[in-house]
Amino acid sequence: MYKIVLFLILFLSCVFPQDAAVLPVPDAGLEEFADSVVTIGEVSVVGKKAQEIIKPQSISGAELERLNSLSVADALRYFSGVQIKDYGGIGGIKTVNIRSMGTNHVGVFYNGMQLGNAQNGQVDLGRYSLDNVEEISLYNGQKSDIFQSAKDFSTSSAIYITTKRPRFKSDERFHFTGQFRTGSFGLVNPSILWEQKLTDKMYLSANMEYTNANGRYKFRYKRLQLDGAVAYDTTAVRHNGDVEALRTEASLYGFIPDGKWSINGYFYTSERGIPGAIVNNVFRHGERQWDKAAFGQGAFEKKFSDLYEMKIAGKFAWDYSNFLRDDPKELYLNNHYYQQEIYLSVANLFNINDWWKVSASFDGQMNKMNADLTDFAYPIRWTELASIATSFNFDKVNVQANLLGIFIQESTRSKKTYTASPNRKELSPAIFFSYHPIGDGGLGINGFFKRIFRMPTFNDLYYTEIGNANLRPEKTWQYDLGVTYDKAFNHKFFDAFSLRIDVYYNEVTDKIVAYPTGQQFRWTMLNLGKVRIGGAETSARIAAHILDVKLGLNLQYTYQKACDYTDREDAFYGDQIPYTPLHSGSVSFFSGWKGWELGYCFIYTGERYNEQENIRYNYEQPWYTHDMSLSKAFSIKKCAFKVTGELNNIFNQAYEVIHNYPMPGRNFKISLKVIL
């Protein structure tokens, strides 16, 4: 009963906020690369931008457009410390793993609110297009801002996706952007974006995108015996990788005195083939999947006085998926899954003085799952999160500390078949700091410590026959120390230079793994794993110019040792965990001149192993790709155009991100963008 009362209080707080006077305050402009300009018309910015103790890795604006990427997952490949699990093709599922702690430890936030999947804890980033994205930011630990929801403190690392916000000059009433892409794999990809200025204090944005592709591409399949003899070596065509998807979004933004509000609606539907693994010369698979996802979310932010500010946010999400296996050689499956989520949050900020701030946040969330499976558990999870945080900001030293309490209760409708997971109470502390010996900017030293956990997913707890309702949460300890250097130049060649180096150590305990039991072919989920992860990341950016030619160079490198220390009796004790390379990195370069832009990107992933034992049989070769793009922007009267040609995997390298899931060879895209 108290949970219902809690949600009612939060709901009433959202509907009846305290009175306030009005002054338009749009979002502050995003920090762009040297060649990007954001124009903001007829607005007043009130208050100071929140100071981040540790700056994230981020891509925005023109730089984001140059990455030859269709989805958010593709863009994240250029961040250090990130491993993308890509199951191949334009419609393949794409998930992200940061610093080898596991996909389930990554929080993905869309316009400030987390995308959830209580069933398996993974978010398919291939669903989220870049056409309506303004900025992507990656935070290790968490966003170093205390004025946020309790949910923002609850992940080991976080990806923030911010969609484009309307910005108008004084004489503008609307913007229209249309784009059409075509290319390899039978790609047809139109999208439109409409932005309307309803009043001086209210803007509307609507976006729609359609994707259709047959997903067919040639690949080389080669396998060697342990003695080096060729087992298989053939060229075939990847089938059942087609996709048809529609994404629509609509957002309303409003500004009030010393505050703002927003409402966002999202709908996605798709049908795709699941091409499956290539094993023993079997190239065709019959699996299909249908997905539907919808959510509505809103946020209200208000500064009531110099002492007190408040944020209120809420969300309702609904997800449906249908998995069909209609292959005469395999067991027939036709399963339907339904998920619902309700989320409400209140965050409070107290500005004690210029250098000391305190925040308190409280969130409530309900996750529910249904399916048409025999003896399904029908689980319901209630989660309450409460955080208290403080920050001290001086000229050279900034410190932030927070304590998060998480309280979880679960129940199942099939009580005779399933026992619900026991209630959980966990406390998670974190400390962040930065030191600038010469004041703001320039040289900086920063670091953090954080202890956090992730709850087992519904699949871990209740999956038929192998689920284990007594699983403990998977815990992580994170330690990070970094150095940053930023410098702007007034030079005939150099414009700006930035360098970032981080060393880190992570430890994951009570790792949830599938483990064989006494009976043959019977498995269960157990807390057995312990992983120790140490690594170093470095990134550098250089902006320069030669006369009217603008130049930019980005470099990323990651060294990572992530080893399994679960059981000394295991043959793989101390071995590198699957799909984690020791070395990885990327290089991206661009030049711009009078509307022309040339871009080049190189991505490298070193040798890995596809199973726990680091033996020759499980060895995965390094892979790398070279991509290039050329674009031209021009105007005809009041209409702006941009034509782009892209050539990816220029040297047609055959490679696999996941074992037995071949990736495409050389491919191209051509796009036309029109802006009114």
Image: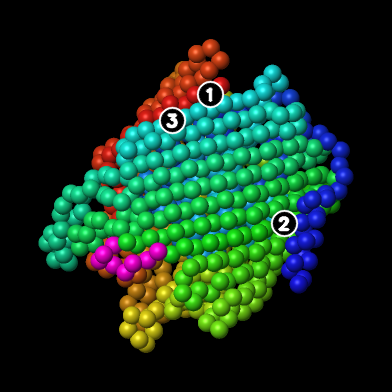
Q: Residue furthest bottom?
A: 518
Residue 317: x %, y % from top left = 60, 55
Whether residue 202 is visible to the viewer of this picture, yes or no, is: yes
- As drawn, 318 above or below 648: below
Q: In the structure shown, which secondary structural element does the residue marked by tag 2 occupy? A: strand
Q: Which residue is mark 3?
A: 180
Mark number displayed over residue 675:
1
Residue 173: x %, y % from top left = 67, 23
Mark number displayed over residue 324:
none
Does the stretch in magenta take in 332? yes
Q: Would you say the residues marked 2 and 1 are in contact, meaning their CB atoms lie under 8 Å apart?
A: no
Residue 559, by quadrant, is bottom left
Q: In the structure shown, which secondary structural element does the residue marked by tag 3 occupy? A: strand
Residue 670, by quadrant, is top left
* Lateral position of residue 625 relative to residue 545, left or right: left
The mark nearer the N terminus, 2 or 1, is 2
Residue 53: x %, y % from top left = 65, 49
**Residue type, mark 1 in image:** Ile
- Of 432 and 460, nearer the camera is 460
Residue at left offset 41%, top offset 68%: 563
Mark number displayed over residue 345:
2
Q: In the structure shown, which secondary structural element does the residue marked by tag 1 occupy? A: strand
- Of 74 and 284, nearer the camera is 284
Residues at marks 2 and 1, CA–CA distance in whole angstroms: 37 Å
**Residue type, mark 3 in image:** Phe
Whether residue 549 is visible to the viewer of this picture, yes or no, is: no
Residue at left offset 62%, top offset 30%: 195
Stretch of the chain drawn in magenta: 327-334
Mark 2 or mark 3: which is in front? 3
Quadrant into which the N terminus falls: bottom right
